[in-house]
Amino acid sequence: MDFDPSKPPKKHNVFLPIILSFVLMLGIWLGYFLSNRINRGSSVNQNYHTSTNDKINSLLDYIEYQYVDTINKKDLVEKTVTSMLQSLDPHSSYIAASEFETVNEPLEGNFDGIGVEFNIIKDTIRVITPIEGGPSEKIGIRSGDKIVKVEGKNVAGVKITNKEVFEKLRGKSGTIVTVSILRSGIAKPLDFKITRDAIPLYSLDASYMIKPTIGYIKISKFAATTYDEYLKAFNELSKQGMKKLILDLRGNPGGYLNAAVDISDEFLANGLQIVYTQGKANPKKTYKATTRGSFENNPLVVLIDEGSASASEIVAGAVQDNDRGTIIGRRSFGKGLVQDQLQLPDGSAIRLTIARYYTPTGRCIQKPYSDDKNQYYSEEYDRYENGELLNEDSIKMDKTKQYKTPEGKTVYGGGGIMPDIFVPIDTAKTNSFLNKVFYAGAINTFAFEYADKNRNQIKAYKTAKNYIDQFEISNAILDEFYEYCSKQNLLLANLSKSKTNEALKPYLKAFIGRDVFDKDAYYPIINQKDNSIIKATELLSK
């Protein structure tokens, strides 16, 4: 989703309660009037002379009073609003009051809680890692700890869900929650009183040096804190000698428009256009680069794929249309609609599409949509079925919508950002056995349990870099993993272990490393076999 930064989320008009009260009174009166007519023998199918504005209220009141069974009018109103917005376009939506905080958390950049990353493994809450600087880390919670009780109530072996964990561990800052922990090597449970606090949600997943002069930054979403996170990572990489950058926006669904503009500004010279928005009630508004960019002339590669949408496409489009860098990967999602958020008096909100955004050459990259929203969101699967993810010649988009960049390069509108260099999906990742164990969560679970049993030995490497350089997935670890899969009935009858091992090793090593050294060990390992990153590194090494 993309929000216009010049328009903060709207609060309701002070006269809105009065207007709503008047409409409600009018609706009740009309409902009473209609009810009396029906009771006097009038036909149920009579044409009631109501205006468009009155129709919905009148209908809701009529249903409430006359429907054969008792209904919950509040639920009916919410369903009506939801259906109304869904009929407009794929991205206009309604957010119930009960869901508002959860929906907004990823973009606001924080939530209130105890600050742990966790998995539910064998029906037990296992701490993957306490968040750095959070209340759990400060009080001594460790990776591998098992949370068995919350406020004295058992939470292990009761088929607890992620949602229930959130409900028990999250809460307002300053409130206290008591948890009981089982820790390896300690016989009795440990009780901790944790004071909840604001926990940061990071939108920058990884930043490290791939080669002596080539840096890598991966952004997972464009949130309120993204620009600050980027600047911190950029400055750290610059100190390490970064002269060239790979910006990874693959799988990034977007977020705040102003965050995308701020990131784009870092790469573009003063005065160059980044994006413009325009809608029926919203005149054309152009966003241009300023003088603050700190990476305006250095070599740049942006990675995109079918999961890159919205704000990600703003950045990729600005870089491509200004001939500023090279776009590598596969065609992006194709979302060129801008939403504005209106908060309603009951705490709910609507996100309404108010404009389209256009890249500097004037192209709108919103892909076509119809009333069938399922078809719209399953289009990514259609790309796979049509062979587009494997072969550039199979890409199905309207190539008649052609535009020219300042240097004469042809770019296309009407269905996402086309990369300058196409990289097919990695077929090794579609290995049937790997798919099976991934979907079953077997690699993740096995890696966590292996790391938990061997935590001291792995910690002996001291740093993520030492772990990456020195730790190897041995045949013994592979055999242990296959034995684990056999117990879970995940082995395939015709499995060729020799062919699978090479594809499997990086994932096992990355997940084991993540459970001890967090993301610092995960991405540098996973990316070693990544074809898009290999292509980007080759390009920047010339």
Image (cartoon, rainbow, N blue to C red):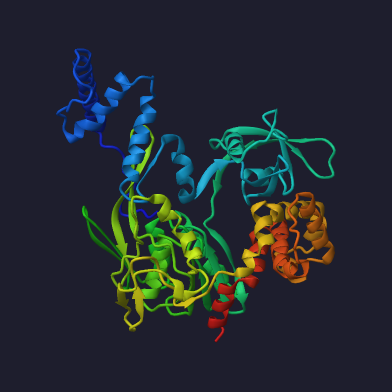
Query: So how many labels did they put on this image?
Result: 0
Decide if residue 214 is on the left or right side of residue 338.
Answer: right
State the image quarter where residue 177 is shown: top right
Q: Position of residue 299 (x, y in %)?
A: 48, 80
Decide if residue 345 is on the left or right side of residue 48.
Answer: right
Decide if residue 331 is on the left or right side of residue 446.
Answer: left
139 vs 326: above or below: above
Q: Kindly tell me whether residue 471 is visible in this rendering.
A: no
State the image quarter where residue 312 is shown: bottom left
Q: Position of residue 477 (x, y in %)?
A: 81, 61
Tell me which residue sits at (38%, 79%) in the image: 323
Closest to the observer: 376 or 77? 376
300 vs 120: above or below: below
Placement of the C terminus among the 4 image quadrants: bottom right
Q: Position of residue 25 (x, y in %)?
A: 22, 22
Q: Kindly tell me whether residue 369 is visible in this rendering.
A: yes
Seen from this angle, which residue lies furthest bottom?
Answer: 542
Tell me which residue sits at (53%, 35%) in the image: 172
Seen from this angle, which residue lies furthest left?
Answer: 49
205 vs 361: above or below: above
Tell me which residue sits at (44%, 77%) in the image: 420
Closest to the observer: 367 or 126? 367
Q: Position of residue 286 (x, y in %)?
A: 27, 64
426 vs 84: above or below: below
Closest to the observer: 163 or 294? 163
